[in-house]
Image (cartoon, rainbow, N blue to C red):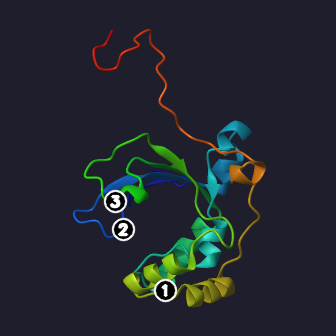
Amino acid sequence: MSSDFIQCAIYVPESNPARLAGIEYIVTGDAFSKFPMEERALWHSHQYEVTSGYLIEPGMPDGVDDAVMKILVNSYGKTVHTWRYDEKNNSLPLGIPELVSGYTGSGQLPEDFVASRDAFFNVNTTLIREERQKVIKAPPVQDGADSWKYGYVLTLELKNTSTTTNFTSGK
C-alpha cells in the first residue's frame, strides 16, 4: 500500500479449498510511533515472531527471507480473524470476528504445534532462530503495543445500537 503500510490475507492452514481466515495490517515502527496510545493497544509487535523463527516464509531463499525479516522485526500488526482457526469443521465463517495478537514471548506457542508446522513446511524453527540472531537486531518494542502485557483483553462484540430489538422480524 505504501512504504509504511502493507496488508496481508491470512488463510486457515491445511484447508482445501483455502479458507480466508482474516486480514493483518502491518505498519512500520515509524508509522506506529505516531499512533495515539488508544490505537496502539490494537496492535502487536513482530519482534518476537521474527527473532524466534516462528514467522516464516516457506520456500523463500535465505537472502530474501533475511531482507524481509529485517524490515518486519521493526513492524506492528493489527489482525482480525473472521474465520476462527479453532472452528475448522465449520463450513461457513460463523461468529463474531476476533482481534488477535501475534506471539510475543516464549511459551505461548505449543511445542507440538511448532513441530507439526516445521514438518509440514520442512523447516527447522531452532535453526531459523539461530541464523536470525546472527543477522537481525531487534529494536525494543514501543510502548502501547502488545496490550495484553498491560492487562488489557480486547474483544469485538455484537451490539445492537438501533431501537430494533428482534433480529428475525426487524421489530
Q: CA distance from mark 3 to mark 1?
A: 32 Å
Disc 3: CA contacts within 10 A as few (<14), some (14-19) or many (>=20): some
Query: Who's the residue at 51% across and 33% down the image?
Result: 157
Q: Which residue is mark 3?
A: 88
Disc 1: CA contacts within 10 A as few (<14), some (14-19) or many (>=20): few
Front position in the image: 148 or 95: 95
The circle drawn on residue 62 is 1
Report whether 121 appears left or right of 2: left
Q: Earlier in the sequence, mark 2 or mark 3?
A: 2
**In what element is the residue under mark 2?**
loop
**In what element is the residue under mark 3?**
loop
> Which of the 4 quarters of the picture holds residue 130?
bottom right
Q: CA distance from mark 2 to mark 3?
A: 9 Å
Q: Position of residue 77 (x, y in %)?
A: 57, 54
The circle drawn on residue 132 is none
Q: Which residue is mark 2?
A: 13
| Residue 128 sits above or below residue 104 on the image | below
| Residue 97 sits above or below residue 158 on the image | below
For the residue marked with disc 2, what is the amino acid? Pro
Report whether 97 appears left or right of 151: left
Query: Who's the residue at 71% across and 71% down the image?
Result: 138
Pointers 2 and 1 in contact (C-beta within 8 Å): no
Q: Earlier in the sequence, mark 2 or mark 1?
A: 2
| Residue 170 sits above or below residue 115 on the image | above
Q: CA distance from mark 2 to mark 1?
A: 23 Å
Nearer mark to the viewer, of 3 and 1: 3
Quarter of the image with the C terminus is: top left
Q: Earlier in the sequence, mark 3 or mark 1?
A: 1
Front position in the image: 70 or 87: 87
For the residue marked with disc 3, what is the amino acid? Lys
Nearer mark to the viewer, of 2 and 1: 2
| Residue 161 sits above or below residue 93 on the image | above
